[in-house]
Image (spheres, rainbow, N blue to C red):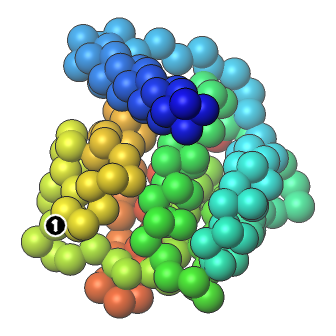
Amino acid sequence: MATRLVQIEQDASRMTELTESLLTLARADDGALEITVGRTDLGELARSVVEQNGAAAADAGVGLHAVTPEQPVEVQVDAVGIRRILLILVDNALKHTPPGGCVSVSVADDVRGAALWVQDNGNGIAEEALPHIFERFYRADPARSSSGFGLGLSIAQAIAQAHGTKIDVVTRVGSGSRFGVLLEKA
C-alpha cells in the first residue's frame, strides 16, 4: 500500500510539473511571462546552482563546477528566471554527460555584456536535431522519453527571450555542447 501511495504522489508531482511548464509557455506565447528585474550577480547565481546540483552530479559520476571571476558580474535580470535557465541547462548537461565527464557553469564579462554558459563534454547534439532542440516536446533521443517532458529548453529559451536575448548553442557529436546566454550588464 505504501509503495502505491508513493507512486501516486510521484505521478501527481509529475503532472503538476507538466502543468506549470505548459502555463509558463502559454504565458510566454501571450507575451505575459512576468519577470521581475533586479540587480543580480551572475557569479553568485552560477555558484549557487552548481552547489544545488552537486549531489545529482556526484550520483551521475559527473564533475560539476563553476568558473566565475573574483569580481561580481552584475546584470539587471529576473534572478528567478535566470536561475531556471541555469537549472534546465545543468540538468540537461548532467543527463547527456557520461560518468567521468565534466560540466561547467561559467560567467564572464564580455565587451557586449555578461556571458553565461553551461558546457559539457558529453554526447553532443546531432546536426539534424540541432534546429529542433528548442521546440516543445522535442527529444533528440527517444530512448530518454522517461526523463522529462521535452519542455525544458523551450522554457529556457522563452525566459531568455523575455530578457531580450536568446540561448546560443555550439555542439559537436562526441565532444559535448555549450549553451550560452549574453545578458546586458547592470
Residue pointed to by mark 1: 129
Callout 1: SS: loop
- Residue 41 at what x, y percent from top left? 77, 41
Q: Is residue 29 visible?
A: yes
| 173 and 185: which is toward the camera | 173
Coordinates of residue 81 in the picture (x, y in percent): 55, 30
**Is 88 or 112 nearer to us in this picture?**
88
Label 1 neighbour load within 10 Å: few <14, some 14-19, many 20+:
few
Quadrant housing residue 80: top right
Asked if residue 10 can be seen in this view, the reply is no
Q: Residue at x 28, y 46 (%)?
A: 150
Image point (43%, 71%), residue name: 96
Q: Position of residue 33 (x, y in %)?
A: 40, 16
* Drawn side of residue 13 relative to residue 128, left or right: right
Q: x, y (%) of residue 27?
A: 32, 14
Instruction: Name which residue type carries label 1.
Output: Ala
Q: Quadrant of the C terminus?
A: top right
Nearer-the-camera pick, 173 or 44: 173
Q: Is residue 53 above or below residue 186?
A: below
Q: Residue at 67% of width from left, 37% of height from top?
A: 75
- Residue at screen point 61% across, 88% down: 100
In the rendered view, tell whether residue 122 sits above or below residue 146: below
Given residues 148 and 69, the one toward you in this image is: 148
Q: Quadrant of the N terminus?
A: top right
Dividing the picture into quadrants, the one containing residue 111 is bottom right
